[in-house]
Image (tube, grey):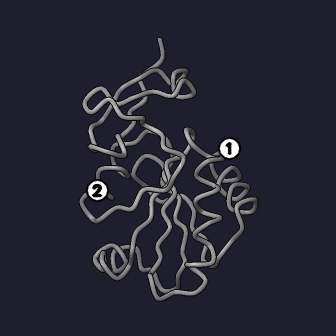
Amino acid sequence: MTEPTHIVCPHCDAVNRMPQSRLQDAPTCGKCTQSLFTGRPLDVDSARFERHIGRNDIPVLVDFWAEWCGPCKMMAPAYAQAAGQLEPAVRLLKVDTERAQDLSARFAIRSIPTLALFKGGREIARQSGAMDAMRLSAWVRQHTG
């Protein structure tokens, strides 16, 4: 028997357990009954970031960005498109570096946009600079197998 996969709900942050094979079946949250995968990046603050990084068993891609950043704004539609392509295999988060300065300092974000890929609560890859959806998806797949 395989171990259950833990997925954090993007709506209520409850941790859901399910077989890996059910991820493709449009699963819903056992607590709030909303969809566990929305096909869109999730904006998070520091507390929600910790929950999603630490409790999701699937890889988590984080876009560290800022409202004033031109390349960040240019990449935002591509990042949203990539969410539709990568879910349910990967959760996509967005962290506003101006509002979550503690995370910016903790992860030594020196340029934005910066993408950081996490697995099992640990950073496994990082890339700075804007990318289109195709390159972004390929980069994630390269690092997640």
Q: Amino acid at mark 1?
A: Gly
The answer to which image quadrant residue 70 occupies is: bottom right
User: x and y percent of residue 18 in the render?
Assistant: 41, 23
- Name the image quarter holding the C terminus: top right
Residue bearing the label numbered 1: 145
Q: Amino acid at mark 2?
A: Arg
- Give the crowd class for mark 1: few <14, some 14-19, many >=20 residues within 10 Å: few
Mark toward the start of the polypeptide (1 vs 2): 2
| Element marked by disc 1 | loop
| Element marked by disc 2 | helix
Can you name the residue that lies furthest to the top here? 1
117 relative to 6, above or below: below
The answer to which image quadrant residue 87 occupies is: top right
Residue bearing the label numbered 2: 48
Please tell me which residue lies in front, 12 or 145.
Answer: 12
Asked if labels 2 and 1 touch by Cβ distance under 8 angstroms, the answer is: no
Residue at 42 percent across and 35 percent down: it is: 35
User: x and y percent of residue 104 in the render?
Assistant: 37, 78
Q: Any mark on residue 55, and which?
A: none
User: x and y percent of residue 52 in the render?
Assistant: 35, 50
User: x and y percent of residue 71 in the render?
Assistant: 61, 83
131 relative to 55, above or below: below
Q: CA distance from mark 1 to mark 2?
A: 26 Å
User: Left or right of 59: which side holds 134?
Assistant: right
Residue at 46 percent across and 20 percent down: it is: 19
Residue at 48 percent across and 86 percent down: it is: 110
